[in-house]
Image (tube, rainbow, N blue to C red):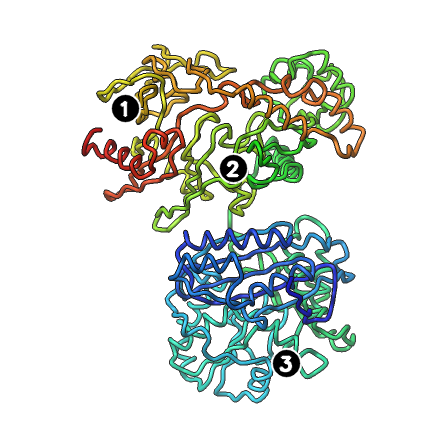
Amino acid sequence: MYPLAHPLGLETETTIILFYHYTPLGTPSEMAIYASLQTSLLTSLNLTGRLLIGCGPSEGLNGTLAGSPSSISTYTSLLSLSPPPPPFASFFLSHPSIPPFSIPPSSFKYSSHINININKNINDNNLFPDLHIRVVKEIISSGGKFSHIPQSSLSTGLLSPSEFHSQVSSMLPTTQLIDCRNSKEVAIGTFRSATNPKTRTFAEFGTWVDNNKADLIKKDKILMYCTGGIRCEKASAYVREVTNKPVFHLRGGIHKYLEEFDSTNEGLFEIQRDELLTLYEDIRTGKKFRARRKTLSRQIEKLEVAMAAGCEKSEINHIVCRSCGEPKSVCNGSCWGFFGLNRLDKSKTKSKTPATATKRRQQPQQRQKSKKERNEIEITPPHRFLDAGSSLRTPLPIFRTLACSVKARHCGRTVREVILSEFFVCGDDSTNCAAIEKGLITVNNTQTNVGYVLKNGDSIERVVHWHEPPVKVGQRIEVRRVMLTVEGEEREVFCCNKPCTVPTHPGGPYYSNSLTCMVEAQENLSPHALKPCHRLDRVTSGLLVCCVDGKVAKFIQNRMETGRVKKYYLARVSGKFLEEPLTVDMPIFIDDLKAGIRTVDVRGKESKTVFRMIKFDGNFSLVLCEPVTGRGHQIRVHLQSLGFPIVGDTQYGGVSYEGEGANTKLGVACVERSAILKDVASEQEKKAVEFCDCCVKGPEAAYSTAQLLGDGCMIDLNAFRYDVDVGSGVTLSFKVECAEFAKDFFGEKMRLEEAIGNFITEKKKI
C-alpha cells in the first residue's frame, strides 16, 4: 500500500479522480497489452469508471475513476512511481520503443461524492457501475484535427491557477481569452470576458479557429482554458501553430482553478449555481430527463465542494438561462437536451411516420424486457466462476423471467395449449398447469388460469431458476484486434479464438457462458455490443470474426454471401485420408430439425467443400478443409459421407475421446456445486426452485450428455483462418492460433504454419 493524503481533506465513502497524461505510446496491439495490466490493477482495487489509452507518439492516458479513498490513494501512488512498478516495468522492458512514464501527483484532480439535497436519491456506491478501458486513436476526440501535433508542443504555455488568475485580472484589450469547452459547459459557468466559440463538441473547435484566424492574428496574446486541461494542451498548440502568437493555457483547467479561487477569495470564474439548482428541480424525475439530470448533477456536486455555500436572493433574481435566454423562473430545462444543440428548427420540419398500434404496445415491453435481462444476468470474463483444477466454468444460477409476445397463430387458443405445443421445454402438461396455478407462468405479468384465451398484443412470461451448463475455457480467450477500412473509415474487427464447448452467442440454456458475453466482459465492451459476423458450432473451436459496428458486420457478411471469403479449417480424422485433393459437391438436408441433424440428401441445399490431406501420423490424418458454401455442419457431414468422420464427432460417427465419462462427472459436479442456494428472496422464487429440474432431479435430467461435457461435446475441427477480399485487389487475413490437435502432428508451431501455408498457396506438397 502507498498512503497518500487526500487533497480535499475529506474521507468520504467515494472518491473521484480525473487525470490525463500525454506521453509517447505504442501501437494498438502493444497498448492492448498495457490495457490488460491496467484492467487487472483497477479490478483488484475495485475501482470503476473510464480509462482511455491512446496510441501513437502524441497521445497518452485519460481517466475518470471512482472508489474508496484508500483504493484511489494506492492507484495514484503506483502511477506516480518512477521507475514504474511491476508488472508495468516488465511491459516497458519488453517494449523498448515505448519510454517508461509516471504521472506526477499534481496531475490528479480529486473530488468527494457528497449526497447533497438535490441529489439524495443517487446511490453513492454506484457512481460508475462499470469499468471501461479502451484503446483509442485520441484520448480526447478532435476528429483527427489535432492528431498531427507533436508531443513537444503540448507542454508549452502552461500557467498555474495563480498565474492565470493574475493574467485574467490584468487582461488588456489586445489579449483574447477563449473558453475551449462546449456550449453546455459554458452555460454552467465561465469567465466574464471569455469568448464562447459555441461549439457542440471538441471536434468543432479546430474549425472555429480556422474560421476566426484573421481576428486571432490581430491579438498580442491569447489565453485559453477548459474543464481539466486535456483539451487546452492540444487546442493551444493548434492555435499557436495557426496564429504564430503567444498562447497560454490554464494548467489543470477549471478544476484546479476552483481549488484555489472561489467566490470567497476573489475568484473570477462565475458559476450559475442557483440557476442549475432551479433547472435540476424541474427535471429531477422522469425517464425523459435522465441524461440531462446526469449532466447537471455531476457539475453541481463538484461546485458544491469548491464553492462557499449559498447566495443572497437579491444576487440571483436577474439570472437568465444561458442556453435559451429565458428567466430562470420560466426555463424548464428542455433547452439542455435535444434543443440545446440548436436543432429546434430541424425538429419542427422533420417528418415522422407514426408507429402502428401493435408496435407502440410492443416497444415498451421490449425495452422493459431488455433492461430486466441486463439486470438479471451478470456478464463476466472467462476467469470468473472458473474452476482452476478442471478448467470448467459454471456461473451461479439466477432467477430469470422469460417472455415472448403472442403471435397470430396463438390467438384464440388457450395459454395451456400454446405452452404445451410451442415450447418443447414445457412438455409436461401437468407441470405446466401447476406452474400456471402457482403464478410462475403469467400473461401480461398477471396471474391467470389454464383456460385463458390468448389475444393479439398479449405476452406470456415464465419465471425460472436459471442454470447454465459448464463450458471448458482458460483464464482468457485469445482475441486479436484487426483494423478494417469500411466506407473510408478504419473500424475494429475482433478475431476471437472460440474454445470447444462454448456457444457463439446466447441461446438455449447458455447465456453468460457464451463467447460474445465472455469477450464483452474481458475486453471491457458494453453488454450486447459484440456482433458475430458468422457462427461456429458449439463443438467446433477456432476463429470467430466479431465486431461492434453494424456496418462491419454487414460488410463481412456481404463478402461471405458473394463468395469473396476463403475459409480454412483443420480436421483430424481416423485412418489415412486420400492423398490427392478432393472436392465434395453433395447437397445437405436437415433430417431432424429439433436435434439439428443433417445428412447428404438430394432434397437439401447445394453444398461444396474441398479437402486436402496435410499429414498422416500412422493413426490419424490432418486434413485441410475449405468450405466453398456455408451450410450448417457442412464439413462434418461431408467427411462422414467419405467415411472419415471427425475424431470426437459422435453425432456423425466419429470415435469418442478417452475420458469423456470423467468429464461428464466433473460437469455434473460443477453444476451441483453452483446450485447450492444462498438466499431466496421471495415466495415466487421458492416456487421456481420447486419446479427446477436441475435442483429437483439433478443436472443429468436437465441437460444432454454433450451439454454436461460427455460424448460429442468437442470435436477435432478448428477454424483458423479467413481470407477476406476487401476490394481493390487487397486480401485481409483473419487468423488465430491453431488447435493443439493440429500442432501435435508437427511438434513445432512454425513447421505447422509453414505446412499449412504451402498448401494454401499451392507452392509445394508434403
Q: Which residue is mark 1?
A: 613
Labels 2 and 1 touching (C-beta < 8 A) = no
What's the residue type where badge 3 is placed?
Leu
Q: Residue at x 77, y 77 (%)?
A: 314
Disc nearest the viewer among 3 and 2: 2
Q: Residue at x 40, y 74 (%)?
A: 152
Front one among 423 and 126: 126
Q: Which residue is mark 2?
A: 474
Q: Which residue is mark 3?
A: 268
Residue 441 place in picture, x, y as percent: 71, 23
Q: Would you place residue 608 above or below residue 251 in this image? A: above
Residue 613 place in picture, x, y as percent: 27, 24
User: First in sequence: mark 3 or mark 2?
Assistant: 3
User: First in sequence: mark 2 or mark 1?
Assistant: 2
**Helix, strand or loop for disc 3:** loop
Report whether 646 appears left or right of 585.
right
Q: Residue 122's image quarter?
A: bottom right
Q: Indicate which disc residue 121 carries.
A: none
What's the residue type where badge 2 is placed?
Gly
Report whether 434 appears left or right of 225.
right
